[in-house]
Image (tube, rainbow, N blue to C red):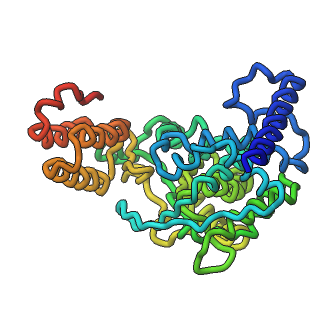
Amino acid sequence: MALGINNLNNRFNINANNNVNNRRALGMANLPAGIFTTRFKLMKTYHDLWRNIIDFDNLQIAYNSARKNKTHNPLVMEFDQHWRLNLCILLRELRDKTYKPLPLRTFVLRDPKTRIICVSDFRDRIVHHAIVNVLQPIFEKRFIYDSYASRRGKGVLQALNRFDRFKRKVTGNGRLRQNARNRNDVVGFALKADIKHYFQAVDHQVLLTCINKHIKDENVLWLVKRILDNYQSDEPSKGMPLGNWTSQFFANIYLHELDYFVKNQLKAKYYLRYVDDFVILHDSKQFLKECEEKIKSFLVTGLKLELHPDKCKIIPLRKGISFLGFRVFYHYKLPRKRNIRKIKSKLTQAIIEHENESRDAYSVLDLFQSWSAYAKWGNTYNIRQRIYNSIEKEFITLLPIQKING
């Protein structure tokens, strides 16, 4: 048995060395391993990506990504003990197409909305990263600039900054309405909307068609379908699990069709999207009404999705737009009230746990500081100071080093 394992390891070591030599031949020997996937940009067609996905180097990079910040997880620790052998076994399963994901573990998260979160086994998460390593560079250059979720260099802060830029453009740098009552009483409107039960409503066949526009490799499509089919939903061939890295990536591929439609067919210049939450700014309310109707029709016929009836509204900019946890006015932005209630509730519970000696003081402070780092991007100095003062008496010896900035 030991001899068989050694032979298996030696064979894949030889393959790994050959891959390094191939990179040298391409003039990429001096590139760091972290940008391994950039070599796929050299490919002119995408008919033969399978070998790149099951490449041992790619699986090793995927393994390192999947275990990042999770090295104390028991499943990760178990895999780590014989990681090279486990990767070889995983590679063989993929190569022979005997790979089958393990059942998802689920739990309910109320934060404050109730969501069902699905967790894949660690070895399956490696496969997810391996897929995204290869496919993301291909699709990234096709995504519009103003899609901000699960992309390098993007995120909540960048989306909020872009929203600020758009509102200045639409209002002509803050032009006020006639008989304005305050300096935030500006012209302009926003169509604010999101998709009804987006992750549960994604149609597998539509998603595969979107991917197949650019990826013609049947083996890759087989693996994507196998991952999608591992999610058990109320409707067959529907839905993706919240929590999978592939789900976040596929979500962008799916709604790229909407992005393209809005930007190129509707000619909506000031449009941005974060996952399924999107906004269009314009100085004409009638234009936004027409956009809303056309988007509804496109989603139903093209993507088999629906706008959320309670969350699709055309709102005057002067009233403030709820976006990514903030209510954004022209001259300032405030955290939503439910977010403030949530952090207060979490801190109260954390302090109780600390008093019961089931939580240390520094973890309570970390909870406050992590929220404060997010909230400071709004006009929140006063509310952060009040929350800080409310817990200061509990941790008087620790808090002097924790400053409220901004």
In this orientation, which residue lies closer to the viewer: 137 or 180? 137
Vertical position of residue 229 compared to residue 285: above or below = below
Residue nearer the viewer, 314 or 63 = 63
User: Could you tell me which quadrant the C terminus lies in?
Assistant: top left
At 64% from the left and 49% from the top, the residue drawn is 126
**Residue visible at 81% across and 56% down in the picture:** 220
Tell me: residue 213, above or below residue 36.
below
Left or right of 365 in this view: 23 = right
Q: Position of residue 335 (x, y in %)?
A: 32, 47
- Which of 40/68 is in front? 68
- Judge whether residue 266 can be spotted in this image: no
The residue positioned farthest toward the top in the image shown: 30
Tell me residue 73's x, y (percent).
47, 48
Count the labels in the image.
0
Q: Is residue 375 left or right of residue 24?
A: left
Establish if 307 lies above or below 397. below
**Residue 361: x and y, percent?**
20, 40
Taking the spot 43% from the left edge, 38% from the top edge, the residue there is: 174
Examine the rendering and report whether any part of residue 133 can be seen.
Answer: yes
Q: Is residue 284 above or below residue 394?
A: below
Of residues 326 and 105, the one nearer the viewer is 105
Q: Residue at 76% across / 19% down in the picture?
A: 30
User: Is residue 58 rendered to the left or right of residue 370?
Assistant: right
| Relative image position of residue 111 (x, y in whole percent) | 36, 60
209 vs 268, left or right, is: right
Residue that protrudes farthest toward the left in the picture: 393
When asked about the image quadrant of residue 246, the answer is bottom right
